[in-house]
């Protein structure tokens, strides 16, 4: 514990400022889009030269802290299904342990950093392409999560996707459970979703919300606000256990996690407040672009690392942090512009 | 190290994770208080008044 605390104090002021600033940006993106902040942290730490186990372990501990803060808010809004969360915790925890064991196994072979980076290239690139295409075709659902508005809707009004209905009718292996929104589903479907997203979390050090949320909606049939709240609640436990396991192996660096969390808690408040002012569809295309840039950045960084070219590694790092900063700045700028426009429209009316 | 592990009790790691949990709760409460105190003044400075912006 003391060595962990001195780890924070030992960090140089430049690194502290970098982590707080990066945390602020990541928190802003997370607060606004409801996802997407955490999976920039691990690649950035890898590019900063941290060992894979420290990059993934500290990334996971950061996700754990962020999930605690977000869950406190969603609990207040009544958007957490504790029964679903409790069932998912078991599956996700086993999945995380399988993912974590894979990281250490690959690290022993000297392949962990390379393989994790390659998985990130495909993951960020794939999701980035999907979001950009959706934003350009204009059939997105807003992307940003207006938590207060979602809380006002009746959960039974949400339409269950066809694929979820089909799964509920086909897979009827007991025990069956009834979830919020009158959803009745087999425990085994929930466990399978939890395990597969847990493996991804443990391997990449991410919360897994960008996979688990759609999986909860399309495979289990949970209403969107409950999927968001329950996902975060579940990450508190799975992220906590994952961080504990990585921490036991020396993979959690408080000198990284504490300043990141300090910045992200503030950023998440700003991002969450901005969803009430700005239509996320206006910014979603930048978000997709940011993920694509992140994918290219990790690729460039990895090539630089393979060739021993420090310039390429630096270009990769600047690109991954720079693209996140640009999207965060776009959110703040658009929010302030909308607020000023609203004010200038209201002023003549008042006169 | 590379195999699957059952978590065992380790006070040092528990305190490490506990300190992250404590920091998260303190930040949630602290920033909420800060928002109440500084928020309206900051909005006034940035856009000329929170009430107009609603």
Image: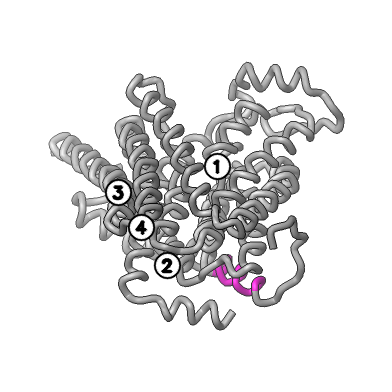
* Chain letter belonging to callout 4: A
Q: Tag 2, which secondary structure?
A: helix
Quarter of the image for residue A217 reads top right
Disc 1 to disc 4: CB gap under 8 Å: no
A59 lies left or right of A125: right
B17 lies left or right of A59: right
Q: CA distance from mark 2 to mark 3?
A: 21 Å
Are the residues under badges 1 and 2 in a single subunit? yes
Of labels 1 and 2, earlier in sequence is: 1
The stretch drawn in magenta includes residue B17: yes
Q: Position of residue A312 (x, y in %)?
A: 30, 52
* Chain letter belonging to callout 1: A
The nearer-to-camera label among 3 and 1 is: 3
Q: CA distance from mark 2 to mark 4?
A: 29 Å
Q: Which residue is mark 4?
A: A308
Of labels 2 and 3, earlier in sequence is: 2
Is A182 above or below relative to B39?
Answer: above
Q: Which residue is mark 2?
A: A259
Q: Residue at x 43, y 59 (%)?
A: A45
The nearer-to-camera label among 3 and 4 is: 4
Is A147 above or below relative to A133?
Answer: below
Q: Which residue is mark 1?
A: A209
Q: Which residue is mark 3?
A: A319
The segment highlighted magenta reads B13-22
Q: Position of residue A4 (x, y in %)?
A: 54, 77
């Amino acid at each position: 514990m003391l060595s962990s605390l001195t780890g924070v104090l030992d960090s140089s002021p430049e690194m502290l400022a970098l982590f707080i600033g990066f945390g602020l940006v990541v928190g802003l993106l997370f607060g606004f889009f409801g996802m997407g902040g955490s999976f920039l942290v691990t690649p950035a730490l890898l590019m900063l030269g941290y060992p894979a186990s420290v990059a993934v372990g500290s990334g996971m501990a950061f996700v754990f802290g962020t999930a605690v803060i977000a869950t406190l808010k969603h609990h207040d809004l009544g958007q957490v299904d504790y029964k679903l969360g409790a069932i998912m915790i078991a599956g996700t925890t086993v999945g995380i342990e399988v993912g974590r064991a894979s990281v250490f196994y690959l690290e022993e072979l000297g392949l962990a950093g390379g393989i994790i980076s390659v998985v990130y290239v495909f993951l960020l690139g794939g999701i980035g392409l999907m979001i950009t295409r959706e934003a350009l075709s204009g059939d997105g659902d807003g992307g940003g999560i207006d938590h207060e508005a979602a809380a006002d809707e009746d959960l039974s009004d949400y339409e269950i996707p066809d694929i979820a209905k089909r799964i509920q009718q086909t897979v009827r292996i007991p025990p069956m459970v009834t979830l919020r929104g009158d959803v009745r589903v087999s425990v085994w479907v929930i466990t399978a979703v939890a395990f597969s997203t847990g493996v991804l979390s443990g391997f990449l050090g991410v919360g897994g919300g960008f996979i688990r949320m759609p999986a909860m909606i399309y495979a289990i049939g949970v209403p969107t606000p409950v999927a968001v709240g329950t996902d975060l609640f579940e990450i508190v436990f799975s992220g906590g256990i994952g961080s504990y396991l990585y921490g036991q192996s020396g993979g959690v660096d408080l000198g990284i996690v504490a300043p990141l969390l300090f910045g992200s808690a503030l950023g998440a408040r700003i991002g969450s407040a901005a969803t009430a002012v700005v239509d996320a569809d206006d910014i979603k295309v930048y978000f997709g672009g940011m993920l694509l840039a992140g994918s290219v950045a990790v690729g460039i960084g990895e090539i630089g690392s393979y060739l021993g070219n420090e310039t390429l590694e630096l270009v990769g790092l600047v690109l991954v942090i720079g693209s996140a900063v640009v999207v965060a700045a776009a959110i703040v700028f658009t929010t302030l512009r909308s607020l000023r426009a609203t004010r200038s429209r209201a002023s003549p009316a008042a006169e | 190290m590379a195999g699957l592990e059952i978590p065992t009790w380790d006070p040092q790691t528990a305190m490490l994770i506990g300190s992250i949990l404590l920091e998260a709760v303190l930040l949630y409460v602290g920033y909420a208080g800060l928002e109440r105190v500084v928020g309206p003044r900051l909005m006034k400075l940035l856009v000329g008044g929170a009430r107009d912006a609603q």
